[in-house]
Image (cartoon, rainbow, N blue to C red):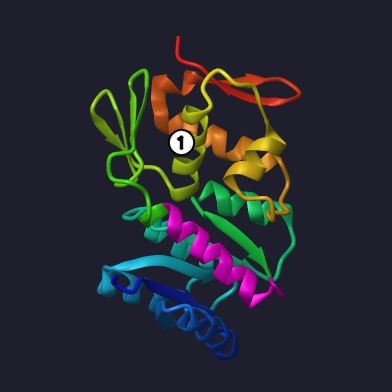
Amino acid sequence: MERLKILVVDDESRMRKLVRDFLVKKEFDVVEAEDGAQAIDVFFDQKDIALVILDVMMPKMDGWQVCREIRAYSSVPIIMLTAKGDERDELLGFDLGVDEYISKPFSPKILVARVEAILRRTTGISADDILRAGAIEINKAAHEVTIDGKSVELSFKEFELLTYFVENQGIALSREKILNSVWNYDYFGDARTIDTHVKKLRSKLGERGDYIRTIWGMGYKFEVE
């Protein structure tokens, strides 16, 4: 099986080496960048990067701007690393299409486990696994969503969230249940993360965003009339 390539972006060489060593032990190929500008160059030069691990605070171009640049062209999974614990930073990251958010200091083993979980879901799904709900069609293998036959660009987490909704049509889902199922049990973020993602997902689904109904004080229900 072809080794998957991961881009590690951090201005601290010690941090890059720590992350790289753990990833290489797990049979990943790793390329590095020491600032945001270099990260953009490497990402678009390599073209086959499967996942990006991206530090927030960097010279020349910070992680937020790098994320914006990548998201303008690609839905590649992005894990954001930050020394800040500010909830506003976390919500900004998710609003920009970040898939996971890990605060420093962190366990390299936990980071690698997150990387493996994301890549299992993006690369290891049966090719004939197609979900349909009203005008929406989800191809889980190709990681593609179409509405009325037209392609819709979703981030990794938006795709996971929509898939979870479609697989649980008609069921009232609490924010905590969605967090546990889509972000995994070891995610310690605020449940309001869900609201941020649902708002953006509804916007991308256009008129079909109405399929996602708010249950006040609890969570959401996906229902096709």
- Asked if residue 56 shows in the view, the reply is no
Residue that label 1 marks:
163
Magenta-colored stretch includes residue 187: no
Q: Position of residue 115 (x, y in %)?
A: 51, 65
Q: Position of residue 191 (x, y in %)?
A: 71, 41
The relative height of residue 21 versus residue 137 in the rendered view (above or below) is: below
Q: Which residues are drawn in magenta?
A: 104-121
Residue 118: in magenta span? yes
Quadrant for the N terminus, please.
Answer: bottom left
Residue closest to the far left: 149
Picture layout, residue 63 above or below residue 213:
below
The residue sitting at 69% across, 73% down in the picture is 106
Question: Is residue 167 left or right of 57 when viewed as pictured?
Answer: left
Residue 73 placement: quadrant: bottom left
Q: Amino acid at mark 1?
A: Thr
Residue lying at 24% horizontally and 30% vertically, measured from the top left: 150
Q: Residues within 10 Å of mark 1 (few under 14, many from 20)?
A: some
Q: Nearer the viewer, residue 208 or 117?
A: 117
State the image coordinates of residue 30 (x, y, percent, origin top left): 41, 80
